[in-house]
Image (spheres, helix red, strand yellow):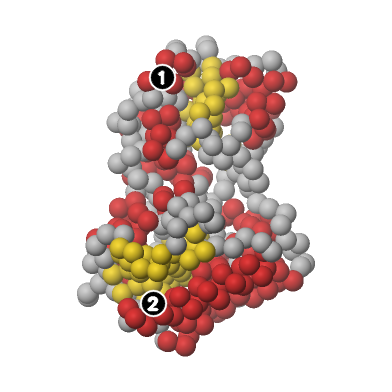
Amino acid sequence: MKGRRVVYITYDGLSDPLGQSQVLPYVEGLAAKGHELHLLSFEKPGQPLTWLTSRGRGVAWTATRYHKTPTVPATALDMAQGLAAASVIALARRADLLHVRSYVAATMALPLARAAGVPLLFDMRGLWADEKVDAGHWPRDGRLYRGAKAVERHLLAGASAITVLTNDLRRLLREEHAHRAEIRAPISVIPTCADLDVFSPAAPVDEQLARELGDARVLSYVGSFGTWYMADEMARLYLAWRRHVPRARLLVVSRDDPSPMRRVLAERGVSDELVHRPSSRAEVASRIRASHASVCFVRPTYSKRGSAATKVGELLGCGVPIAANVIGDVRDVLGDERVGVVVESMSDDALDDAARRLARLSERPEVAARTRAQAERWFSLSRAVDAYDAVYRGEVRADTAWP
């Protein structure tokens, strides 16, 4: 079968870190498979717009403006301009597939899919409306949540194919979702993946950072702070870690201020053990490589059953074992503690036990090879592109699990 002519719609901007890591590499990979893609993105103020720019062979790009406030009218405006732009592109390109990334993009494209009879790939990502509730932005009994869940029902019923990030979310949709009987499309699990050519045990270590850390045993945290990330609990894991290694440091690789962690360490008089490195995407791998183990604690809410943290794949790809709590498929990824530690409770005893096991695991000479192998099994970008290619070509007729 020849490649598809695809309009790919994302509500993220290509200038955003997420657009750089989780949109463009997939689009470029699918173009290399013979598909023709026209990418429609929404760029933040200050970023240039374009109606038609080439992003390489097989990829055209249209960038429209993202509006943030007031929330509902701004999103409505974005959806209207997105539908108009997507309609023109689909007609001009004679598109035979709409690939829509998450709910807002899917909602703006659904009328076009129905009117033009173009198949819709609902790249669902996670439970967006439930994330809004779990983050405290919407009340569960409010009109916005009820409206978004009604739209979710139409999207799931109207899609020709559905992709999600976790096996757990696929099971939820098939076995627990209120409108599971209306979901007729096959559901494919394709997690957020990592560029394992960049995130590798062979990545060079940041030499200046390595000199600063010296002979310390380094626990790292990579990523942002805010709604979902359990900064206090991760700092407490570090306090436990330092009891099980001879000399410890906590490395924070983040553009955000690590004050939530520093405050917890200050209460114990060890805030000077936190080393902060604000990092561009190009610098992250070299700084991960300066650590011996890492931690990733995410609030275990209902919506997080559908989440796959990109940083897990990047850390494992660099050969670094992880302590993580249970969201999505974490239990399956970390498995029998050959590549990390699953933390079931945030009690002091549980964190101390997890730190002890993680410290012991980090000392094993074979751990880097094992974590790398697990990253290639679960988080390979090339495997994810192959999976999307199969969906594009209509080769997926039934639900597919991952890996």
Q: Is residue 224 visible?
A: yes
Residue 271 percent coordinates (x, y): 64, 19
Q: In screen coordinates, is 216 left or right of 70? A: left
Q: Which residue is mark 1?
A: 208
Residue 227 percent coordinates (x, y): 66, 46
Of the 4 image quadrants, the one containing the N terminus is bottom left
Q: Amino acid at mark 1?
A: Gln
Residue located 34% across and 64% down the image: 53
Give the tally of numbered discs: 2
Query: Does the residue at mark 1 contact the one at mark 2 (Cβ under 8 Å)?
Result: no
Question: Which class describes the residues within 10 Å of circle 2: few (<14), some (14-19), or many (20+)?
Answer: many
Residue located 63% across and 46% down the image: 228
Q: Nearer the viewer, residue 353 or 94?
A: 94
Residue located 44% across and 21% down the image: 209
Residue 355 percent coordinates (x, y): 56, 26
Which quarter of the figure has residue 202? top left
Q: In the rendered view, would you say 313 is above or below 157?
A: above
Q: Which residue is mark 2?
A: 89
Q: Nearer the viewer, residue 173 or 4?
A: 4
Q: Amino acid at mark 2?
A: Ile
How far apart are labels 1 and 2 at the CA level?
49 Å
Question: Which class describes the residues within 10 Å of circle 1: few (<14), some (14-19), or many (20+)?
Answer: few
Q: In the rendered view, would you say 391 is above or below 238?
A: below
Q: Is residue 297 visible?
A: no
Q: In the rendered view, would you say 7 is above or below 212?
A: below
* N-terminal label among 1 and 2: 2
Per the image, label 2 sits on a secondary structure element best described as helix
Q: Nearer the viewer, residue 208 or 213?
A: 208
Q: Nearer the viewer, mark 1 or mark 2?
A: 2
Residue located 30% across and 53% down the image: 382
Residue 92 percent coordinates (x, y): 34, 81
Q: Nearer the viewer, residue 252 or 149?
A: 252
